[in-house]
Image (cartoon, helix red, strand yellow):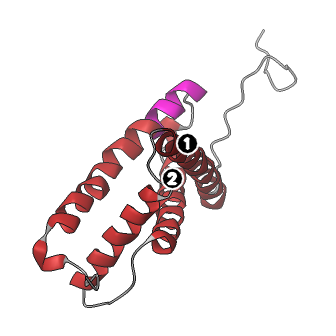
Amino acid sequence: METTFQGSSLAKVYNAYVTLARGMGWGVLGCLASTMVMDLVLMGGLWAIGIPPFTCFSIIGNTMARFFSIQGIEMTGGIPLGVAAHYLIGPLVGGIFGVALAQVVALRGCTLKQSVLLAVLYIEILSQPLLATTPILLNNPSCHLETGD
């Protein structure tokens, strides 16, 4: 006799319907939280070794200013631009990851450990070109901003 598992609490139901907005929301939220934790650890480490804690934001801001100066858009670099860029790029990358995860059916059944490993792999691969732009733009003499010295 065949029975169905509809009334059983042991039946594992797979919900194939995940909205893009929900995936994007979880991706943005997760990436925003991880960006904040990363910044706290980084600023604490910089402070511990005697470097000003906001140096990382200053480097990001100066890189963004140099990038925009190549495009013909003049802007001031520094900490405010670095904070804005850092907290716009991070959640944007998380949102893209969340949407991709919501669309790929094979990845929705992953365990938490597999999902975290996939997210770390994703951000490490995606961040390499972003990290490479800093030494390229900041050491390129044709891209230097006027410092007033």
> At 28% from the left edge and 81% from the top edge, which residue is drawn?
147
Give the residue pinned by disc 1: 44
Tell me where residue 66 appears, x and y as whole percent. 27, 76
Give the residue pinned by disc 2: 53
> At 36% from the left edge and 62% from the top edge, which residue is drawn?
59
Q: Is residue 72 left or right of residue 82?
A: left
Q: Is residue 113 magenta?
A: yes
Tell me where residue 26 appears, x and y as whole percent. 64, 51
144 to 23, vertically: above or below: below
58 to 10, vertically: above or below: below
Tell me where residue 83 appears, x and y as whole percent. 52, 66
Q: Secondary structure at mark 1?
A: helix
Tell me where residue 141 appears, x and y as whole percent. 11, 74
Q: Nearer the viewer, residue 141 or 33?
A: 141
Q: Residues within 10 Å of mark 1 (few under 14, many from 20)?
A: some
Q: Return the mark for residue 24.
A: none
Magenta-highlighted residues: 112-119
| Quadrant where the image shows the C terminus | bottom left
Residue, far right: 7
Q: Is residue 108 magenta?
A: no
Q: Label 1 amino acid? A: Gly
Most frequent secondary structure within the magenta stretch = helix
Q: Is residue 28 left or right of residue 139?
A: right
Tell me which numbered mark, 1 or 2, is placed earlier along the sequence: 1
Q: Nearer the viewer, residue 127 or 14?
A: 127
Residue 48 at least partly seen: yes
Q: Secondary structure at mark 2?
A: loop
> CB atoms at circles 1 and 2 under 8 Å apart?
yes
Q: Is residue 18 left or right of residue 113?
A: right
